[in-house]
């Protein structure tokens, strides 16, 4: 059984006695900064010159400085810039200004696991990774709850790195739900696998193939959208609440029987073999190298793939239909550029 931690296992005063710099104010950065501040921690947000995030952080009453200045003062430096830029920010602005003995905190193990960042021996290296998007990390905290976190220590220079990690996890609200002990290697490899094979890659491809199959057979795209995309949330909510068993209990016997006989026809053992190949590419660093090499070249492959996805025929159908749903909050946000911030 995995080792679990809750609020009572952590001492909040440890992180409250430190100066914390949070580098980046995007999805995770804004949530960590605000939750730390509201837990009584001294936080400065570190941002680059001319950053569009600066006004957002200042409007929330947070202190903002350049990355170099924020780091220079800090006992704890939290690196929450996008994974693909972390090693550059680390090399140019963090490492040269890092205090002796300052701790480094990550929200995902990518750069440590694949060796893109190699901190000197004198620094504690920790991870506190919420298992949910940053906006939920903030909303749950404000509501008195928390998003579960996974916690790891890669380098324990001070001998007290675990106490600091748990104190930090408590301050962002994670231990109100639970903290699970892991390692940088386990977190990085399972996180990448989950998002590639199941949560993002697998589900998106499954929806698109389902939509194509129905519309190519002559069914109305709007009806196809409901059947293969809209209802997915309702099904996932049931699975989340009570496992696959609850979902099968709630749907009709017709749907449950169809699940048993057709699920394995669609997702064949070949798919599992493909998943194993994806996992191997994660473990051997091939995925990380492909991602970082493409980013270093200006992200041509990433941009082309993003554009292709945005042009899939299910997207305009969904955009029009969602405007008509009384129960979906209207949003004029443009989801086609960049990422959540
Ligand atoms: P975002 O893409 O939301 O981060 C954007 C922020 O990083 C912006 O404030 C941006 O500032 C800043 N930034 C970008 N480039 C630089 C730079 N060169 N120097 C300084 N700041 C920079 O990141 P996420 O929150 O998605 O991810 C952060 C970390 O958290 C990653 O390690 C990720 O894997 C992990 N994580 C993310 C989750 C999520 O919910 N998104 C979930 C769990 C973990 P500017 O305004 O200047 O562009
Ligand atoms: Mg991830
Ligand atoms: Mg149905």
Image (cartoon, rainbow, N blue to C red):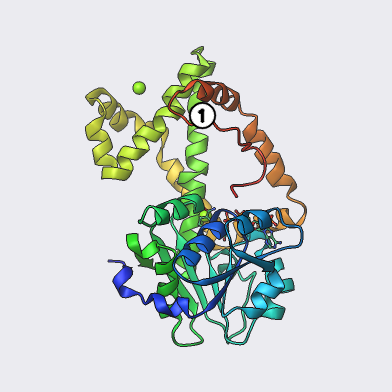
What residue sits right under mark 1 in the picture? 209
Q: Position of residue 184 (x, y in %)?
A: 49, 69
159 relative position to 51: left or right: left
In the rendered structure, the answer to whether residue 67 lies left or right of residue 43 reads: right
* Whether residue 217 is situated above or below residue 163 in the rendered picture: above
- Residue 179's spot in the image, x, y percent? 36, 65
Q: Which image quadrant for residue 257? A: top left
Q: Is residue 146 visible?
A: yes
Which residue is at the front of the view, 35 or 163? 35
Judging depth in this view, the residue of 23 and 180 nearest the camera is 23
Query: Looking at the picture, how far across and down is residue 183, in whole percent?
Result: 44, 70
- Quarter holding residue 264: top left
Q: Is residue 286 left or right of residue 170?
A: right
The residue shown at (51%, 37%) is 204
Q: Nearer the viewer, residue 234 or 218?
A: 234
Is residue 290 something that shows in the picture?
Answer: no
| Position above or below: 136 against 306 | below
Q: Quadrant of the N terminus?
A: bottom left
Name the element at disc 1.
helix
Name which quarter of the figure residue 176 lies in: bottom left
Residue drawn at x 76%, y 62% is 49
In the rendered image, residue 223, in percent from the top left (x then y), is placed at 46, 17
Residue name at image x 54 percent, y 17 percent? 216
10 Å neighbourhood of mark 1: few (<14), some, or many (≥20)?
A: few
Residue pictured at 49% horizontal, 69% vertical: 127
Of 261 and 101, the residue lying toward us: 101
96 vs 40: above or below: below
């Amino acid at each position: 059984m995995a080792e679990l931690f809750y609020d009572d296992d952590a001492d909040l005063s440890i992180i409250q006695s430190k100066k914390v710099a949070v580098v980046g104010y995007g999805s995770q950065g804004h949530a960590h900064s605000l939750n730390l501040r509201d837990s009584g921690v001294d936080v400065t947000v570190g941002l680059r010159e001319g950053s569009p995030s600066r006004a957002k952080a200042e409007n929330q009453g947070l202190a903002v400085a350049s990355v170099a200045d924020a780091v220079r003062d800090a006992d704890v430096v939290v690196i929450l810039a996008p994974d693909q830029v972390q090693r550059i920010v680390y090399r140019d602005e963090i490492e040269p200004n890092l205090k002796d003995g300052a701790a480094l905190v990550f929200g995902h193990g990518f750069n440590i696991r694949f060796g893109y960042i190699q901190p000197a021996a004198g620094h504690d290296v920790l991870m506190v990774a919420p298992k949910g998007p940053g906006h939920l990390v903030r909303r749950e905290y404000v509501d008195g709850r928390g998003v579960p976190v996974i916690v790891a220590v890669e380098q324990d220079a001070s001998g007290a790195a675990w106490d600091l990690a748990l104190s930090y996890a408590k301050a962002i609200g994670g231990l109100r739900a639970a903290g699970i002990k892991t390692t940088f290697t386990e977190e990085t490899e399972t996180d990448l696998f989950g998002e590639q094979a199941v949560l993002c890659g697998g589900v998106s491809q499954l929806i698109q193939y389902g939509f194509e199959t129905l519309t190519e057979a002559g069914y109305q795209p709007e009806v196809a959208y409901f059947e293969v995309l809209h209802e997915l949330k309702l099904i996932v909510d049931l699975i989340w609440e009570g496992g696959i068993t609850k979902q099968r209990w709630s749907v009709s016997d017709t749907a449950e029987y169809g699940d048993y006989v057709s699920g394995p026809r669609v997702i064949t053992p070949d798919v599992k073999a493909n998943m194993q190949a994806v996992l191997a590419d994660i473990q051997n660093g091939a995925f990380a190298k492909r991602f970082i090499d493409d980013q270093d070249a200006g992200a041509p492959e990433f941009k082309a793939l993003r554009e292709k996805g945005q042009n899939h025929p299910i997207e305009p159908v969904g955009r029009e239909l969602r405007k008509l749903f009384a129960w979906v909050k209207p949003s004029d946000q443009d989801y086609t550029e960049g990422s959540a911030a």
